Image (cartoon, rainbow, N blue to C red):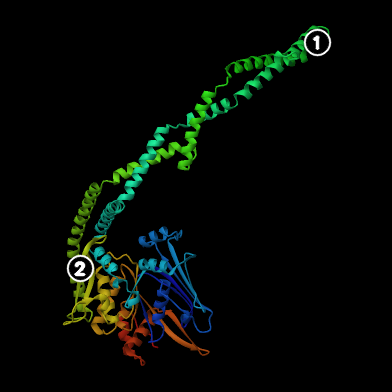
Amino acid sequence: MLRNLSIRDYVIVERLDLDFGAGFTVLTGETGAGKSILIDALALLLGERADMLVIRQGAERAELTAEFDTGDAPAVSAWLVDNDLESEDHTCILRRVIDNSGRSRAFMNGRAVTLAQLRELGAFLVNIHGQHEHQSLLRSGAQRELLDGYGGLTDDTREVAAAWRAWQRRREARVALETNAAAYAAEKERLEWTARELEALAFTLEEWQQLLAEHARLAHAASLIEGSSYALEALSEGEQSTLSGVNAVVARLAQLVDYDPALRAILDVLEPAQIQLQEAVYALRHYQQKLELDPARLREVEQRLDAVHSAARRYRVQPEEFPGLLAQTRQRLDELVASGDVQALQREELQARDACESLAKKLSAARRKAAKKLAEQVTAAMQKLAMAGGAFEVALEPLAELSSHGLEQVEFRVAAHAGVLLQPLGRVASGGELSRVSLALQTAASAVAAVPTLIFDEVDAGIGGGVAEIVGNMLKQLGRRHQVLCVTHLPQVAASADQQWQVSKRTANGEVSSRVCVLDQDERVQEIARMLGGITITETTRRHAAEMLGARGKVKEK
C-alpha cells in the first residue's frame, strides 16, 4: 500500500507531501489544477521515462519519493529479497531525481537501481488505469494472469510451467546429441583412451612417495657408502677415534673421582655421551650393511618415474592429481554413455511432452470455464457503466506449439456498444471506456488481485447521473480489498469516497503552483457543491451535497 508521496519542484508543484490511507480516496478540483500531475509523478517513480521538462521552472532538479508498506504484498517482498533490496521493516522507498541536464537517477531503499527494475517492481505495487502507457491489462501476460487468478488456477499454471521446463531440458539434450553426434563420439573415444592409459599406469600416491625416496637413495648410493664409512672411521675405527678418546677420558676420571667427588658431576655428563656415541656406531654399521650399489634397480625405478612424468606432461597435471583425473574421466564417460542413447532420450522427451500436454489440457478446460464466467460478470457490469449493449469476451486462441503457459493465448476483447465488433482491449479508443472496462474487470477479480494499489484516471469520462453513482459504489467496493485512488470530476463518485483531496492551483509572484488539501466533512460538502453547481454555489446546492455525503446536522453558511 502507498503510504506517502513526496514531490519537490515537479512541473508546477514546488513542495508537496501526501500521506495516504487505506480504502477509496478521490482527487477533485478545477480543470487544470494539476490532479493528473500526482499520477504522472507516481508513474515516474514506477519507471516511466522522464526529461528535463518535468522540472519546475527555475529549479535545478525535480525529486520524487514514494513510500510503500509491503507487509500485505508478499510478491513485492519476495522480489525485493531476490534482488537484495529488502528492508527490515516491510517498507519500500522509491526515489527518482531528474536534473536540469536531463539526467535521471533512481533509488530503491537507498540503493541505486535501473528504470527496468523500477518498472518490474512497479508492476507488483500499482496499477494505473485509464492511460494506455500505464495499463498493465493491455499486456497479454497480465490478461492471462488475471484470468488464472480469477479462476484460482495459479497452482495449475505453475505445474504446467514446471512440466514444460522438464520437457525442454530433455528436448535440448536430445537435440544436442543429434547435432553433435560426431563430437560426442570423439569425446567418448578420447575419454576411453585416457581412462585405459591411467588405469594401466596403476598410479597410487603411496607408491609415488616410495619411488621418490628409493630413487634418491639409489641415485646417491656411492656417496652414502663413502659418507657412512667416513663417519665410522671418525667415531670408532680410526687410530684417533672419537669413541676411543671419550672412553679413555671416562676411565681416567673414574680413577680420580675417589680423590675429588666434584668430578662426579662431570662423569654424569660424559657417561651418557659415551653410551649415545656407541649406539650411533652400532646404527651406522647396521645402515652400512644394507647399502649397496644396484644399477639394475636404479634403472627400473627411473623408468617408472619417466613413465609417470611423461603422462603428467601429456595431461598437464601433477602426478599427485592422477587419481582425481581418473575419477573425473570415469564420471564424464558415465554421463556420455547415459546421454548418448538417442532413442532413450527420444522416449524421455516424448514422455515429458505428454505429461506437460496432459496438464495443459486440464488447465485449458479450467480456463474455458473461468473465461465464460468472467466475461459474463464484466459484460453485466458494462451495462451499468454507460456501455449499454456492450460486451466483453475472453478469447482463448490456440497456440501453434505448447508453451510454458499452456496451449492457448489469452486475449481480452471488448465491444463498447451494441453493433460494435469485439476487438482487443488495447484497441479501445476512449480512455474513459478503457478505464470503465478495467474497473469492471478489477471489481470482478478483486478477491484474487495481487496488486495492492489501484489508480483510476478518466474513469468518469462520458458518464453522469445514475451511472456515476454506480461507478462510485464499485470503486468503494473495490476499496474494501485494495487501496484505490481516483481522479474524478463527478460529485457522485466523490461522494462515495472514504477520503477526499482537493487539488487547486494558485499564482504568487508570477509563479503558478499546485497544492493538495485533505478535506474534512464540511469542506467536502463545499467541494461537492462546487462540483454540482459550478461557479455559483447556493444553499440548495450545499444541501444537496450534504445529502449525497450523508452529512448530519445543519450545513454551515459559506
The quadrant where residue 245 appears: top right
**Kind of residue sitting beneath label 2:** Glu
Which one is nearer the viewer's eye here, 219 or 455?
Answer: 219
Residue pointed to by mark 1:
261
- Left or right relative to 72: residue 292: right
Extreme residue toward the right, this view: 259
The residue at the point 31 percent across, 50 percent down is: 182
Q: Please state the horizontal and vertical placement of residue 62, each as a whole percent of the image.
A: 49, 77
Label 2, on which residue? Answer: 397
Looking at the picture, which amino acid does disc 1 mark?
Pro
Q: Secondary structure at mark 2?
A: strand
Report the quarter where the N terminus lies.
Answer: bottom left
Mark 1 element type: loop
**Quarter holding the C terminus?**
bottom left
Could you say where residue 218 lies in the image, as x and y percent from the top left? 56, 25
Quarter assignment of residue 67: bottom left
- Give the x, y percent position of residue 244: 74, 12
- Would you say residue 555 is visible in this rendering? no
Front position in the image: 178 or 27 = 178
Residue 3 drawn above or below residue 8? above
In the displayed structure, 388 sits above or below 374; it is below
